[in-house]
Image: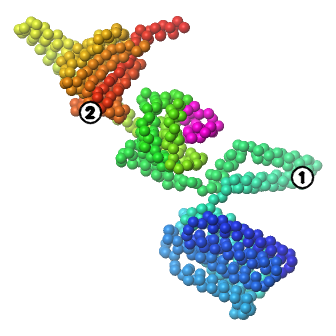
Amino acid sequence: MEPTFSQVAAWSHAIAAVIHALFAVYLGLAWRNGSRGSFLIAAMGLSALWASANWAFVLTGWNWLFLLGNLLDVLRMGAWFGFLVALVFQPTAEYEGEVPPRWPKPMTLAVVSLGAAGVLCFSMGLPVYGTPLRTWATTSLMTSVFGLVLLELFYRSVPERSRWGIKPMVLALGGLFAFDVYLFADALLFSRIHPVIWSARAFAHTLTIPLVALSASRNPEWTFRISISRHVVFHSTALAVSGVYLLLIAGAGYYMRYFGGEWGEALQLVLLFGGVLFLGVLIFSGAFRARLRVLLAKHFFAYRYDYRTEWLGVTQALSVAGDGLSLGESVVKALADLVESPGGGVWLRDASGCFSQQARLNMPHYGVVEKEGSAFTGFLLEREWVVNLAELRSGFSVGGSEVSLPEWASEISDMWLIVPLISSGVLVGFVILLTPRTPIDVNWEVLDLLKMAGRQAASYFARMQATEALIEARKFDAFNRMSAFVVHDLKNLVAQMSLMLRNAERHKDNPEFQADMLDTVRHVEERMRGLMTQLMEKTPINQPKPVSLKGLVKHVVQSKRMFIPCPVLAEGAPEISVLAHAERLERILGHIVQNALDATPEHGSVSVELSQERNQACITVRDTGSGMSAAFIREQLFKPFQTTKASGMGIGAYEAQQYVQELGGSLTVVSDVGAGTRFDVRLPIAASVRNDGNEAMAN
């Protein structure tokens, strides 16, 4: 060979030996198991030995190194063939059409043996086909052609939808085998080895390594854990983009100088200076680097999740809600499984405009409540960001913004992530996930996945709330229709009571008994007429007026005196007035006292106490009855049409709570199963309200 070609060949094979050896070592470290991976490692290792032998031959000129390199060349081709055969006959492959034929395995052994025989004939000077060189060139050409045939078989055996992962390797091996066909066809035709083609062969084979590595990273079933440094890709991409940019600027400058006349050189200099200056601005711009880094991470790296699988999993988890888990529990489980969290809770907006815990999974019940208009809920709605409490506790901020966390977020240490649930621009609620079982890197991909699942869950909650509101409205509609029949029955009862009253006045025997009977009947008649009027009334209820609680409570207790046990009014009740509707307030207090009587056995006790707490009147009803569980109070007591009585309608407690809140007060319940119950009704005092109003007007 000529010295120039010898120098090119030396550099070509030296570089090929180093790169193949480094990639073989990397594959060996990344290899987990499997025959396909072992064949690929063998192909890279034998390629490194082949390039090393040829490099040594170029430096020393020893012919036995050239023959050794040719033998190693046959062996490395055999390793490539074994790799392709292993891929064709992999047990998990999906084939289109018929099962692959059985001839590749024995044919591969025959071709490799034939190639080795050709090398031996060339080394021993045996002219089996013309000359020893032509014999070796013929067997090597047959080996290269067989590689193309085997590669075509492998490519066709893979379904079209799965070819994305193997296309880089197919291009690499196709180019490798095609280059060898060109080399050995030229040697066979002209009975000599072309020095330029032979020198460039190592360079050409080295260029295929990145494509092979790309396919290996796209096919984890080859059992390689191949990962490319994001920093290396970032800087390499930035450098390549900068180079292309400068080439374009230089080309534009050259064009301007060549065709710009006397202005050309000046314009070229200005253009180059401006281009370099703009490039410097981009390089030193943190926003540009951040966007480039995210762009590369999203488009040039394999995702951690299979989004199709995760989306289907979340949809399945939400669609089967009710099979042992409520919708809220299913949402918590679906989100928690995405990030290896053991559980969490769901806070949803209730009718009062507050977010309270509605469902939980592997999480204790927290009585914390977040108001709808707070800074924290406003942040969740405006930014739609997943809040990482672990990072915030460490001093990090969310997207460069300060998050106004509520007090309860810092008090509960096992809270980890807060995922907003937003549907149609409305904050339906949020999910709090507990600390994960194993450390999780909460990067942009995890956040995007949680946002996607959160939006989907929010749509389910919004639909559930709309359905519940529709069902409740239909129940009230049915109740209203039922009221028409009740009014008709009340009308008949009033007529009967009026007739009895007239007959009693005409046929009384015992004056005292008849007088008492008449008072009782008259009272019942008045109440029934009032109830009938209220049911039939279509005009709005009158404005509330000052009502004396002492007399009203006393009247409620006296109306229940025929029950056992008889309710007792505590002594020392103060004179307090509140703004309310007397009949409606009396009805809801009577309902609370009646519930206490129904839940208390004959040997128990029911007491009613009226007191004043600052600017509020407090009516306390205590009983020693059966009591209620905390879960029943939280989930059923104040929900409409939820009742444990056989003849009850389930709207008494609901109406009591709604009316007390309408008056600006509160209704709280404290109860223990088997130990009794205490109802506390707190209402603003009328005098206090007037005084506050007068002071505001004076100011």
In this rendered view, identify the residue nearer to me: 415 or 117.
415
Q: Position of residue 333 (x, y in %)?
A: 45, 46
Residue ID for mark 2: 644
> Among all residues in the image, which is located at the extreme right?
262
Q: Relative to 614, is 259 on the left or the right?
A: right
| Mark 2 or 1, closer to the camera | 2
- Judge whether 505 appears above or below 419 on screen: above
The reply to whether residue 482 is in sight is no
- Judge whether 281 appears above or below 3 on screen: above
The reply to whether residue 413 is in sight is yes
Residue ID for mark 1: 257
Q: Residue at x 82, y 78 (%)?
A: 59
At label 1, the amino acid type is Arg
Q: Earlier in the sequence, mark 2 or mark 1?
A: 1
Q: Residue at x 9, y 12 (%)?
A: 503
In magenta, the rendered stretch is 377-405
In this rendered view, identify the residue nearer to me: 263 or 152.
152
Q: Position of residue 61 (x, y in %)?
A: 82, 82
Q: Residue at x 54, y 8 (%)?
A: 699
Q: Quadrant of the N terminus?
A: bottom right
Number of labelled discs? 2
